[in-house]
Amino acid sequence: MRAQPQTPKRNFRGLMLLLLATLLFSATTLNAQDAAAEYTEFRGKILDSDGKDPVVFATLLVTGTNISTVSNTEGDYLLKVPNEYLNASLEVSLLGFETYTASLSEVPKSKHKIYLTVEISQLSEISVTRFADANALVRAVFRKRGDNTLPQTARMTAFYRETIKRRNRNVSLTEAVVDLYKQPSTNNIKDVVALDKARKSTDYRRLDTVALKLQGGPFSTLYLDIMKYPEYIFTEDTYDLYEFSLESSTAVNDRPVYVVSFKQKDFVLDPLYYGELYIDTETLALTSAEYQLLLTDKKAASALFVKRKPDDIVVTPTRASYRVDYREKDGRWFYGYGSVDLSFKINKKRKLFNSVYTLNSEMAVTNWELITNDQIVRPKDRLRPSVVITDEISGFSDPNFWGARNVIEPEKSIETAINKIQRQMRRNNK
């Protein structure tokens, strides 16, 4: 009989921990004063060239700066540009599409539609035969990460959103602007997060007496940066537990990209991942990754997510999807966007029907600059990786709550949830 290799124990702290408890929330929300800034808002929608389908997670960048945002899952975008940069250009890019560029002076301020054309990329024969197999290609990506990622600490401004839905109804909404202090991918120093401004509202009446919390807050998406934290997915001990294969090529920022699919081998019993890696053919930089956790063994998968729960509750994960996108500047790639999408079926003893919950968190970097380590925020002002942002609904009544900060345009369902919160607050204030 063939011996089964031992799957290395993995640390999922902050990446995908679900905390179940009864109405228990604890964290400190820090508020900073808005910096006075004159800016112009640009709103619109990004569509494919046929105008039929929205283009989601496209990066919008003000050229010559590090100011950026992403389109939401409906293709909508909101970009706030300081007036000093209104003579610059807008660049819109996404894996598999031709890059769109236009002068901001020619871009309408609202209801603008941007159409992206699918880019057809053919790899040269040299690129195709450059590696003996896809496994060797993936190993090379992580071996060269020091050459392809930022060489020193960066202070990044990012927008974080976390939603919890019961069935199709929003029951909890958290939004925050945070400062990320990103360390180079080649050192072992953990990244630091500081909270700038946040708001949250939870409808406990619809949580079925059980409060769900995605422990880690912004860390849940930050740890998707597998160039900085490869131990969460690929290590020297786990490469051979996966099957890798080269798929049809694509392009990002008008440059050809390898597409490598991966899945765990049949003899591996513990739940691992399957998905695709997108790799720049010239530099071997990782440009994007989309993957899911294999949930065949429901009991083992549940053990990875559930940290604490009541004894009469059974939690079954039904989906665990992840995405990370990197952006490039001056030949270096950096973390730009991450999202976690989790679904759970929850059964309670002596209850006939189950409940289905969906948890989504996403974070987009909206600006950044290189700094020295002595500029990192003091320890007392840092968020803990176990943080759960506390309830603070007052911000939902203020239409100018975010000020000049760039945020991800809310989807229609989130807009509806915000409007409901605002109506409730108006009634309470009468």
Image (spheres, helix red, strand yellow):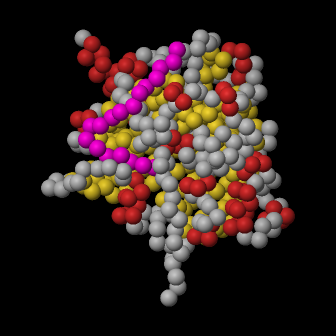
Residue at x-position 32% and y-position 49%? 308
- Horizontally, is 216 left or right of 164 in the view? right
Looking at the image, residue 385 lies above or below residue 285: above
Residue shown at the point (38%, 59%) measured from the top left:
303
Is residue 328 among the parts visible in the rendering?
no
Q: Is residue 244 above or below residue 80?
A: below
Report x, y in % for residue 31.
47, 20
Name the residue: 27% across, 37% down.
23
Q: Nearer the viewer, residue 332 or 181?
A: 181
- Our reading of the magenta stretch's main secondary structure is loop
Q: At 68% from the left edge and 46% from the top edge, which residue is drawn?
A: 187
Magenta stretch contains residue 60: no
* Above or below, comparing residue 192 to residue 196 in the picture: below
Q: Which residue is at the far bottom? A: 1
Q: Which residues are magenta?
A: 16-33
Answer left or right for 179 relative to 18.
right
